[in-house]
Image (cartoon, rainbow, N blue to C red):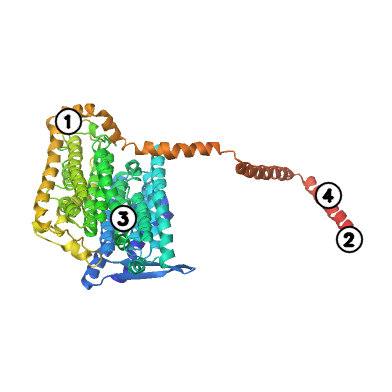
Amino acid sequence: MLNILWLIPALPFLGALILIITGSRISHRVAARIGAGSVGLSAVITLFTGYEFLSSGQAFYRFTAWNWFQVEGLSTAISFYLDSLSLVFIFVITFVGFLIHIYSTEFMETDEGFTRFFAYLNLFVCSMLILVLADNLVLLYLGWEGVGLCSYLLIGFWYSEEKNGYAARKAFIMTRVGDTAMAIGLFILFSVFHTLNIQDILLQAPQVWTVGASTAVLVGFLLLGGAVGKSAQLPLQTWLPDAMAGPSPVSALIHAATMVTAGVYLITRMHGIYELAPLAQLWVGIIGAVTLLLAGCSALTQYDLKRVLAYSTISQIGYMFLALGVGAWSAAVFHFMIHAFFKALLFLAAGAVIMALHHEHDMFRMGGLRNKMPVIYYTFLIGAASLAALPFITAGFYSKDQILWLAWAGEKGNLWFFLAALTGAFITAVYTFRMVFITFFGEAKTHISHRPAKRMTVPLMILAVLSLTGGFIELPHTLGHVTIFSDILSPLLPAAPLREGVESTEWTLQLIAMALSLGGVYVAYIFYIKQPKLADELKSATLGVHQFWLRGWDIDALYDIVFVRPFVYLSRWNKHDVIDKFYTLIVRITEYFNSTFVRTQNGILRWYIMSIVAGAILIITISLFIQP
């Protein structure tokens, strides 16, 4: 099965190609079968390939399709590299992506752009698979830009509304900022190692650079710039909340299984560089810690159900960056996988709620759905419990517990990282159950117009099961010490070493984390169920802070002042500069000759004859004068 590894990205690409060529000439049923079926086949091949790979005991498997290009010493192939890290990612991408495709066949059923939607969705999955399977940074960059293009197409899918087009452009432009930094980093890597093959770079790096070498630190920061843009971390996080303009399945795919996790993958894949650049790695952790707190506070104040989940995604990716910053590579990847399960579940369930309520997004216009939509309620509740890391029963508890523990006990961890992660856990529990209580409890404020069928509810049930049970493949020492996941990754990713004398504190820290998680749920219950007037009073007393957090800490406004307005002003001032006048002159001259020649083509035969005669006379006259 390993020799058909290439089919995993090829099948979604083939599906996209067929859908693009056939367009609206095929029925929705056929388009759905092509779109969902191609990703489903990729998921099946991934399962068989993964089983064979793990059974074989191989460290990696490489498949080279053909040599892409060779220029001045840079030889780049279309070559796929399978190891334990890429296996985890392709499993999540194909499996969760397939469930999102199945859900979309009902969610988008009446949309005029049904076939176009699945073509974009398949191309998105293909691009992400290329990104994580690439054995060289050029091919990885192709997939990297592919998901950027597809995010633009999908966020602005309903492009007839101006705000949707704006959101798509914003996502595309802001991620280009990070991508530029990443591209510069690739140029530096090639200048040093004369190759962009990932494994060759990781093998040579310790021999070329010492720990803390300036070039290694520079490359680490440049790659971090790319990761920050794609994974929506501070300071390039503002595009993600606006990305909610796209259909809900798009939000689930971007936020759970594909685009925003690309930065986590890049840093993890290039972990050897960061081990040689401790300053850059420290800043990975700092950015993650600050982002998870800022985004969590913003999530506390949102009204739009999907924007709460968007800020939640930013915050949870912050946890992954924090883990990467302290060298907890396996813990970051484990949280990525579990996050994909519960966040896809939450977005899809939120989409079902929004669809049922006449496309209403405001949580405060919902309510009373607990008994009217029980399947949606219970699956959403399971996803929320996992996001809030409720102890023992949810997968999110076990994945987040590892990060909290290593933020404190790891050699690269410290008290500030631990306090940030702990505070974020409390905030997460509050805003998560604020969302649950406002949406599903209380009095109904909007009539239900549509009830989701099995194509929407079955994927929710599957994701709900994974959100509960997925964490049991990796348990801490205090709760059974199961290490299936870390054992799979251990040949590739080094374990984070612990500081001396901290083992005895693990139970204490876990109890604190449990108490804060449950305390956050209780606080949300008091404010939004028991005494809802307290929430209104608190909002009135802190209206300035509330509005500040609601606007995302005014980072968009800051960018508008610092970058957008000066650029627009200079563009208007420079509109008629000398260079523009030169090109305008060329255009005017071209237009003049065009209009002159157009008048000669008047359709009157005698004019044509006279022109030929005049031309012949002119040529004969010139030839007579030229001859000696």
Residue 434 visible in this rendered orientation of the protein: yes
| Callouts 2 and 1 close, C-beta under 8 Å | no
Find the distance from the CA under tag 2 to the CA under tag 1: 103 Å
Question: Residue at 14% of width from left, 44% of height from top?
Answer: 517
Badge 3 density bin: few <14, some 14–19, many ≥20, Cα 10 Å: some
Question: Residue at 28% of width from left, 40% of height from top?
Answer: 307
Find the distance from the CA under tag 3 to the CA under tag 4: 80 Å
Name the image quarter holding residue 564.
top left
Badge 1 density bin: few <14, some 14–19, many ≥20, Cα 10 Å: few
Label 4, secondary structure: give it: helix
Q: Can you tell which of label 3 and label 1 is closer to the viewer?
A: 3
Residue that badge 1 annotates? 443
Residue that badge 3 annotates? 279
Residue type highlighted by circle 4? Ala
Spot the residue most to the right.
Answer: 628
Residue 36 visible in this rendered orientation of the protein: no
Find the distance from the CA under tag 4 to the CA under tag 2: 20 Å
Q: Can you tell which of label 4 and label 1 is closer to the viewer?
A: 1
Q: Earlier in the sequence, mark 3 or mark 1?
A: 3
Residue 423 in the figure: left or right of residue 593: left
Residue that badge 4 annotates? 614
| Callouts 3 and 4 close, C-beta under 8 Å | no
From the top left corner, tell me how far across and down residue 388 is, in percent: 17, 45
From the top left corner, tell me how far across and down residue 27 is, in percent: 36, 50
Q: Can you tell which of label 4 and label 2 is closer to the viewer?
A: 2
Foreground of the two, 100 or 218: 218
Residue that badge 2 annotates? 627
Foreground of the two, 278 or 225: 278
Residue type highlighted by circle 2? Gln
